[in-house]
């Protein structure tokens, strides 16, 4: 039993009841990490709340690139409706800031240029505008990108396999640094200065009073067959 | 409170409730034309220990550090992405290549006072006695010019200063630790049970995290953000373990100062000081001796960039060895999935480890071995893990929603030093006009064989633990070598007292001198080498 290689629809669309998650889907329906901000140190609080309250404007990408890449980010993070985490805004902010992650492959240009080439390549693969292609086509193009099967035209300008690694690194950093994603996955978030009370043996499976209770409707591994997931 | 070290008052010089250093207002300030006794390049594990030891002996020491002077209260956050934004990693560009290029940045670099130990996980195992003679014992790599016994007193001194918490350690040279082990969280408990059933011995520690008050350093609160900089001052880094004492004894830590060249006196052939850039201006600090402590990428880069009439290929590079034999450890991780909510974020990442597979066993078909350690990635780290198996879209989201059910084990595999794994200068230059580093890396067959075997052992542990699913990621950890220590100038860059061959007042005191790396995280060894080197100077 495995979730591997599944592009399965989430059969539950488990609705988030308190707090916000991307598309209001989550495993912890009554968990809102943002109710805990008073327990965070001020420096951390400012950094995290900025992600919700001060979404940076797109400055690095032009309008056409942004339209294509937003559609790409939606596909790779399965964000098909609001509320969405504005992934591309944070990608753009990082590229505009000019501070990368500290390395560049010798067969790739700088990260910002990789993103621009990917934007052109996606449009080319869509035979026009990637953002206006059907969802099936967009998913198929991204699938081919992820398997480094896009090789022609624009894609000759870079090592496609590595380029996938570069853009996805930016994507997951933007998505999983957002407190809405923490609500979805039940991550406790910043823990200073409070720390944890139920830590270590014999507290296996125990939660802090403020941590989310997982919805018990199904276990995605154990119940995969039952729910037609496998 | 456990016993404090006799020759290091750092823990007492800190404030019990504020994390920043308290004695900065009385720190010595040397002028550029003061001939200081020693200019140290880099305030990391090597440079900081060296500076503290020599300052205590009355030397006038200036440490030049490219990055800022951190105040953990003001600068650091409990946040994965925020740690990068705070500037803890070396993010200036570097080019990587080879068959198995090594990604740099957050995983294996640091900048700022305290070096990469400010965000290291905290594991501080010793090397084994066998590590110092792998050529003689196993017929691979090279022997060190010093023995374990020569370094042992330094290991012990540093362990008492960090201080290290852990169980009695049965592997290598068996030894105990000054602090008792930390409690073990749920994600490590399931791994431990799997290992037990599989006949693999694991023990708690060894970690450089206080377990109990230590001077004015508080107990760990287990917030889980070791890799983002400790806001508690419980986890060791030179910023809190050695530099307060160094400053108290007249050492100047000159932050935001990027050293671009070591200057060699044209007449006598000795190092006369260092060129550095501060506030946009190029300056020259005079010194009677220079210690380069910039780690495996920046140390070779600085030596190679310091070309002069006497050393047209760079300092210590007459035999074309500077930048060669750079090593990383193979560090694949295998995650196991359990029905319980393990919440692996609720713990320091380093909890339990095993060195049962550390030594060569000819039946396994490769030389040397690996260690096993728990790792507890936060959400971005976990997403990279999921991504590595090809998941994106709904599949990525679903594995991520499952985050709290997973536990992660990693290995550190001893990769062998190879001459073609090297740092060179690229054509591209940085903002200061210095050529950036180009790091090429390829694995040899022995490296690949260890990793394949080690991943299988991790899978067996999860199988024995009744994990419902596993996920694997191939990655690397740590960086050492590049200015190796040896017995002759034909085969090494520095001698056994860290002196660059041919320039008797120029030293390299960091991980780049390590001829081999074992399967141990390198921080403790680097500090121990600096302790030993200081005694010889």
Image: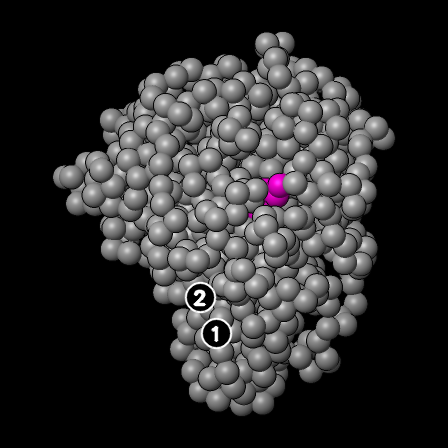
Question: Is the Cβ of the residue at disc 1 closer than 8 Å to that at disc 2?
Answer: yes
Chain for disc number 1: A
x 73%, y 47%: residue: B285
Q: Is residue B522 magenta?
A: no
Same subunit, tags 1 and 2: no
- Image quadrant in which you'd find residue B378: top right
| B210 left or right of A150 in image | right
Which residue is the site of mark 1? A107
| A80 left or right of B391 in image | right
Crowding near the residue tagged with mark 2, few <14, some 14–19, many ≥20 C-alpha atoms within 10 Å: some
- Image quadrant in which you'd find residue B361: top left
Pick whichever, B512 or B390, lies toward us.
B512
Label 2, secondary structure: give it. Answer: strand
x 60%, y 66%: residue: B435
B490 in relation to B152, above or below: below
Pick whichever, B94 or A108, lies toward us.
B94
x 75%, y 28%: residue: B250
- Image quadrant in which you'd find residue A88: bottom right
> Which span of residues is magenta-colored?
B289-294
Which residue is the site of mark 2? B97
Residue A189: percent from the left, percent from the top?
A: 66, 40
Label 1, secondary structure: give it. Answer: loop
x 49%, y 41%: residue: B499
Residue B231: percent from the left, percent from the top?
A: 69, 32
């Amino acid at each position: 039993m495995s979730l591997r290689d599944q592009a399965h629809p989430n059969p539950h669309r488990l609705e988030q009841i308190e707090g916000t998650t991307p598309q209001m889907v989550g495993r912890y329906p009554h968990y809102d990490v943002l109710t805990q901000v008073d327990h965070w140190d001020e420096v951390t609080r400012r950094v995290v709340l900025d992600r919700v309250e001060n979404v940076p404007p797109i400055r690095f990408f032009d309008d056409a690139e942004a339209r294509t890449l937003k559609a790409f980010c939606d596909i790779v993070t399965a964000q098909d409706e609001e509320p969405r985490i504005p992934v591309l805004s944070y990608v753009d902010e990082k590229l505009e800031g000019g501070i990368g992650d500290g390395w560049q492959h010798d067969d790739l240009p700088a990260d910002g240029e990789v993103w621009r080439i990917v934007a052109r390549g996606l449009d080319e693969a869509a035979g026009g505008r990637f953002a206006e292609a059907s969802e099936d086509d967009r998913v198929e193009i991204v699938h081919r990108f992820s398997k480094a099967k896009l090789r022609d035209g624009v894609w000759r300008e870079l090592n496609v396999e590595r380029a996938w690694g570069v853009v996805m690194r930016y994507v997951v950093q933007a998505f999983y640094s957002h407190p809405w994603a923490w609500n979805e996955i039940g991550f406790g978030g910043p823990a200073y200065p409070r720390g944890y009370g139920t830590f270590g043996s014999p507290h296996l499976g125990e939660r802090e009073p403020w941590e989310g209770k997982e919805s018990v409707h199904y276990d995605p591994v154990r119940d995969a067959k039952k729910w037609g997931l496998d | 409170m456990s016993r404090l070290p006799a020759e290091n008052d750092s823990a007492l010089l800190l404030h019990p409730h504020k994390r920043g250093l308290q004695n900065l207002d009385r720190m010595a300030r040397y002028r550029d034309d003061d001939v200081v006794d020693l200019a140290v390049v880099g305030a990391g594990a090597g440079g900081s220990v060296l500076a503290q030891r020599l300052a205590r002996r009355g030397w006038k020491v200036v440490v030049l550090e490219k990055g800022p002077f951190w105040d953990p209260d003001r600068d650091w956050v409990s946040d994965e992405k925020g740690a990068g934004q705070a500037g803890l990693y070396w993010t200036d560009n570097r080019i990587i290549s080879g068959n198995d290029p090594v990604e740099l940045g957050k995983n294996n670099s640091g900048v700022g006072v305290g070096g990469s130990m400010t965000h290291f996980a905290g594991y501080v195992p010793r090397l084994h006695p066998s590590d110092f003679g792998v050529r003689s014992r196993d017929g691979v790599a090279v022997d060190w010019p010093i023995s374990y016994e020569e370094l042992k007193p330094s290991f012990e001194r540093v362990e008492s200063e960090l201080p290290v918490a852990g169980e009695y350690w049965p592997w290598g040279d068996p030894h105990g630790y000054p602090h008792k082990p930390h409690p073990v969280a749920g994600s490590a408990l399931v791994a431990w049970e799997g290992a037990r059933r599989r006949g693999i011995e694991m023990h708690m520690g060894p970690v450089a995290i206080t377990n109990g008050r230590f001077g004015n350093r508080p107990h760990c609160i287990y917030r889980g953000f070791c890799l983002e900089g400790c806001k508690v001052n419980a986890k060791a880094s030179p910023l809190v373990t050695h530099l307060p004492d160094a400053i108290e004894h007249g050492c100047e830590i000159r932050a935001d100062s990027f050293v671009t060249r070591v200057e060699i006196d044209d007449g006598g052939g000795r190092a006369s000081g260092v060129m550095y850039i501060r506030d946009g201006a190029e300056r020259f600090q005079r010194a009677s001796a220079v210690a380069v402590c910039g780690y495996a990428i920046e140390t070779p880069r600085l030596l190679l960039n310091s070309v002069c009439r006497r050393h047209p290929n760079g300092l210590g590079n007459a035999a074309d060895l500077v930048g060669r034999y750079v090593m990383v450890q193979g560090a694949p991780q295998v995650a196991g999935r359990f029905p319980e909510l393990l919440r692996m974020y609720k713990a320091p990442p380093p909890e339990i480890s095993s060195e049962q597979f550390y030594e060569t066993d000819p039946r396994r078909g490769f030389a040397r071995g690996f260690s096993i350690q728990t790792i507890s990635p936060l959400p971005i780290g976990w997403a990279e893990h999921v991504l590595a198996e090809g998941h994106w879209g709904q599949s990525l989201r679903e594995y991520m929603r499952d985050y709290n059910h997973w536990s992660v084990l990693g290995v550190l595999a001893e990769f062998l030093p190879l001459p073609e794994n090297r740092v060179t200068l690229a054509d591209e230059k940085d903002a200061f006009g210095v050529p950036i580093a180009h790091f090429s890396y390829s694995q040899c067959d022995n490296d690949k064989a260890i990793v394949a075997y080690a991943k299988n052992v991790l899978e067996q542990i999860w199988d024995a633990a009744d994990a419902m699913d596993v996920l694997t990621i191939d990655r690397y950890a740590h960086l050492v070598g590049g200015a190796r220590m040896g017995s002759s100038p034909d085969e090494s860059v520095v001698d056994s007292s860290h002196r660059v061959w041919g320039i008797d007042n120029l030293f390299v005191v960091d991980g780049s001198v390590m001829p081999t790396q074992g399967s141990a995280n390198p921080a403790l060894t680097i500090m121990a080498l600096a302790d030993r080197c200081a005694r010889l100077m």
